Amino acid sequence: MSQNPDMQAPADENIPTGEFGLIEWIRRRSASLPKVRLGIGDDAAEIDLSADSGSILVATDMLIEGRHFTLDSATPRQVGYKAMGVNLSDIAAMAGKPIAAFVSVALPRSHGIEIARELYLGLEDSAREHQVAIAGGDTNSWHGPLVCSVTIVGEPTPPRAVTRRGAKPGDHIFVTGPLGGSLRGRHLSPVPRIKEAQSIHRLMSIHAMIDISDGLTADLGHILEESGGLGAILDADSIPIHADAIFESARDGRTSLEHALGDGEDFELCFTVDPADSKRLRSESIEGFKPIPIGVIRPEPGIALGSADGSIRDITPKGFDHFQAK
Amino acid sequence: MSQNPDMQAPADENIPTGEFGLIEWIRRRSASLPKVRLGIGDDAAEIDLSADSGSILVATDMLIEGRHFTLDSATPRQVGYKAMGVNLSDIAAMAGKPIAAFVSVALPRSHGIEIARELYLGLEDSAREHQVAIAGGDTNSWHGPLVCSVTIVGEPTPPRAVTRRGAKPGDHIFVTGPLGGSLRGRHLSPVPRIKEAQSIHRLMSIHAMIDISDGLTADLGHILEESGGLGAILDADSIPIHADAIFESARDGRTSLEHALGDGEDFELCFTVDPADSKRLRSESIEGFKPIPIGVIRPEPGIALGSADGSIRDITPKGFDHFQAK
């Protein structure tokens, strides 16, 4: 029961309220622990190894039947593919290189083996595309729905892991692909931008980066907050809109731009670079790939949307509280 | 969609049957992947990092309400303590040094925040005792029961990680503490033998090691199987019997020795060393700690139990198939 003096329990025992309150409470308690170079609050954690062994990145995400998917609308193989992909996307958001994945599952007793087999094939499909090994896990069956928790271990690429924290006023903001309407089905087959992130990271300094899981304004909002309370002006005409957003717009009457700004689970990356590097990104393709400039970072907080007619209006980043959501 | 030729899907697509069939099927598919020094089938996986950065150990275990615990008989804080402890025990079984833990939870909507807070305090209690940082995770709420998945990252200690594979005929078998009856309550507060394993590992070559989660005969059976189909003779009078096994014996009429041999969730370690090192372990205490010799490894498969009257009888290692268990 010996205790390292650095690891005493913090005195703060206030009961947190709401999910963000809970996560903030956990985050405060785990802040500044030895070995944790980057802890809770970024896409992946960065952990220091023993002297001279560098660091590793670790990302973890749990998919839950009835919450993140239903087996009526997704096959177990699609669930597996997505469970691996969303974690790979978190490693991509750090410009990291994924190495190995660990999968824990709770399987429904009915058809558990068949579900497990299909789930595993889906996990493997995604892992193989990114040269990741499934190296361990825990398999259980129970009387409940399907739960699949994936943890991925990776390494930062030189010179260091990219975080959400380094955006600067004047930076240009880019995304790696068209946005919106992913719930039409695309959310089940995320394409983690691992190679693209590494290619850009090799050529220039990415100041801040995040993957778009909660929606562009929400996730850009995380960059702005973590970078010290900055703001952004987005160019409405530059936001790349996915065809799915247009279909969704026809269905529900919201504009396709609203879908592109607000919809989650695109798993594209959003990142910022300085104006000189922005110019390079706009003038040449990076290994056949061209990210899309969508706006600039400003010192004043808040996200504003500028339109071709010269009007500018504030748009509020919408968060997602799992405990409030229906 | 580029594929590394080393990572093509294996051709074997037979549908596995039963949990062991499933795990074996997964294991065959993941065998000999690059970077995986030690994959599915040991207490933890060992993953190679980039050149000169050594390797890491990763263990993962999921606890499920109604399966591994009930909130009638265990507090969320106890569940958290156990969830962390069982993973630490897997790192201990490799003589590894744990570094950081990652926790994914599915929280019941009713009292979710209160459960999360208590669960987290329990996780933290155990983590702090072993200088492990909780460095990340994923928090979700849903309409189902509590699910808590923990992944721990650690490092091997010199000269290398201890596996289940190295037992040799003539080795002496040791355990680190008394066994049996843990379901009376002790299973909720596992004491992972991290320091003890490292202390012994520093002094001598541990040939094979495992933590006792499924029961002594079942887990020793894993060592024997992984070491090439060996066997063991245990000395009935040497098996250390926990007081809980005696209480259980009085309750259900099975002998306390049966409980010590068959009950799971003791989270003591079982390991083998050569006779010369066995002599050292029996004659001197290791930093105040004395493991208990219980038998020897023999070339013939099967586990036999020798009694003081000179009789020897075969005992069958009992596995535990999650898909067969009621």
Image (cartoon, coloured by chain):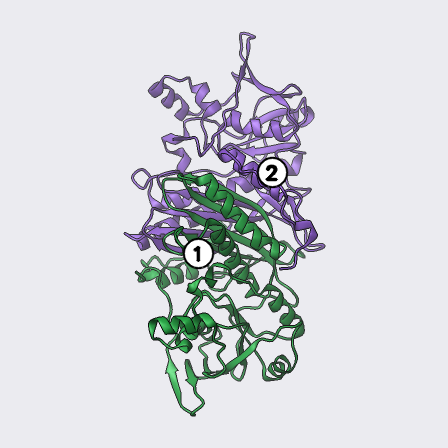
Chain colours: A purple, B green
Q: What residue type is labelled 1?
A: Asp
Kindly identify the residue that appears in the image at 40 percent across and 90 percent down. Answer: B311
Q: State the SS at label 1.
A: strand
Give how far apart the Cα atoms at labels 2 and 1 are: 34 Å
Determine crowd level at label 1: few under 14, some 14-19, many 20+ residues with C-alpha closer than 10 A. some
Determine crowd level at label 2: few under 14, some 14-19, many 20+ residues with C-alpha closer than 10 A. some
For the view shown, which residue lies furthest in the left direction? Answer: A110
Q: Residue A322 or B289: which is nearer the viewer?
A: B289
Kindly identify the residue that appears in the image at 47 percent across and 41 percent down. Answer: B114
Q: State the SS at label 2.
A: helix
Q: Residue A47 or B226: which is nearer the viewer?
A: A47
Above or below residue B274? Residue A252 is above
Same-subunit check for callouts 2 and 1: yes
Residue identified by numbered label 2: A199
Q: Residue B71 or B227: which is nearer the viewer?
A: B71
Residue B41 x %, y %: 46, 64
Residue A190 x %, y %: 45, 38
Q: Which chain carries label 1?
A: A
Q: Residue A11 or A268: which is nearer the viewer?
A: A11
Picture disc at residue B156: none
Residue identified by numbered label 1: A138
Along the polypeptide, which appears first: circle 2 or circle 1? 1
**For discs 2 and 1, the disc positioned in front in the rendered view:** 1
Q: What residue type is labelled 2?
A: Ser
Above or below residue B206? Residue B56 is above
Give the quarter of the figure containing the C terminus of chain B.
bottom left
Residue A137 x %, y %: 46, 55
